[in-house]
Amino acid sequence: DSGVTQTPKHLITATGQRVTLRCSPRSGDLSVYWYQQSLDQGLQFLIQYYNGEERAKGNILERFSAQQFPDLHSELNLSSLELGDSALYFCASSGEGVSGGYTFGSGTRLTVV
Amino acid sequence: AQSVTQLGSHVSVSEGALVLLRCNYSSSVPPYLFWYVQYPNQGLQLLLKYTSAATLVKGINGFEAEFKKSETSFHLTKPSAHMSDAAEYFCAVSVALPFSGGYQKVTFGTGTKLQVIP
């Protein structure tokens, strides 16, 4: 157990639908990062939050949004889903400073049918 | 800006042979460097990290990596491969962004899948 909790582990939904992925960071970590991993695109950085505020954006589609709540958990919302959105979505967290690296959750596998 | 290049998207070694996974980085400031491992259907797990102390870093499962500034490299090695080492390995570089209150930007390589042949 890495200390980063992601739910649900698996999600199957139809095209056009909306889903919410949830992440609880490791205790004490203020930063949360979302990544998408697919076979053809590899590990893609989506977005980062630090203590409730958006800090950095990567290759996140406009159909996707995220937020970090006062208790530091984060949610990634994916809407108008397409077949190409099928992927593993990872959440990672980190503490202060640059030397600690990230702690990853076990991911949510999203399948869009 | 920083970047990471992993040479070889797939590497195959025989069980018991040396494992060498290559990583070169680019950074305008002193970097922190990491290797992560991802087993099938799991998240990334930190193997080891370089944080400007010893240049030879030992990690879990018998892996080690050497920071070579002159070559801008951080290659991952293990003397003898085990079947259980079959996984995907990611190199990453982290730098601090100035005036950011400790915010770090981590850039991941594209990954190297290690196959261990019995």
Image: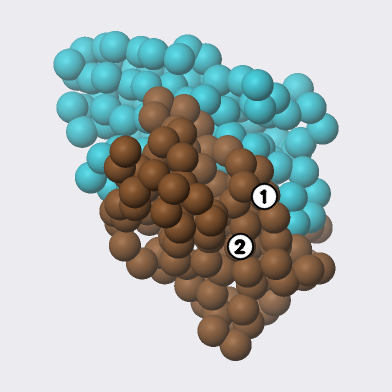
Chain colours: A cyan, B brown
Residue at 40% in and 64% down = B6
Which picture quadrant has residue B106?
A: bottom right
Using the image, determine if residue B18 lies above or below residue A67. Answer: below
Using the image, determine if residue B74 lies above or below residue A4. Answer: below
Q: Quadrant of the C terminus of chain A?
A: top left
Residue closest to the eye, A48 or B93: B93
Task: Locate residue B7, reporting x and y percent.
Answer: 36, 67
Instruction: Using the numbered discs, state the Cα–Cα distance from disc 1 to disc 2 in whole angstroms.
Output: 8 Å
Which residue is farthest bottom? Answer: B70
Report the amino acid beneath label 1: Gly
Report the amino acid beneath label 2: Ala
The total of numbered circles placed on residues is 2
Residue B23 appears in the picture as rendered: yes
Task: Locate residue A104, reporting x and y percent.
Answer: 58, 34
> Which residue does the numbered mark 2 point to in the structure image?
B65
> Which residue does the numbered mark 1 point to in the structure image?
B59
Residue at 30% in and 52% down = B12
Which picture quadrant has residue A16?
A: top left
Using the image, determine if residue A106 lies above or below residue A38. Answer: above
Task: Locate residue B59, reporting x and y percent.
Answer: 67, 49
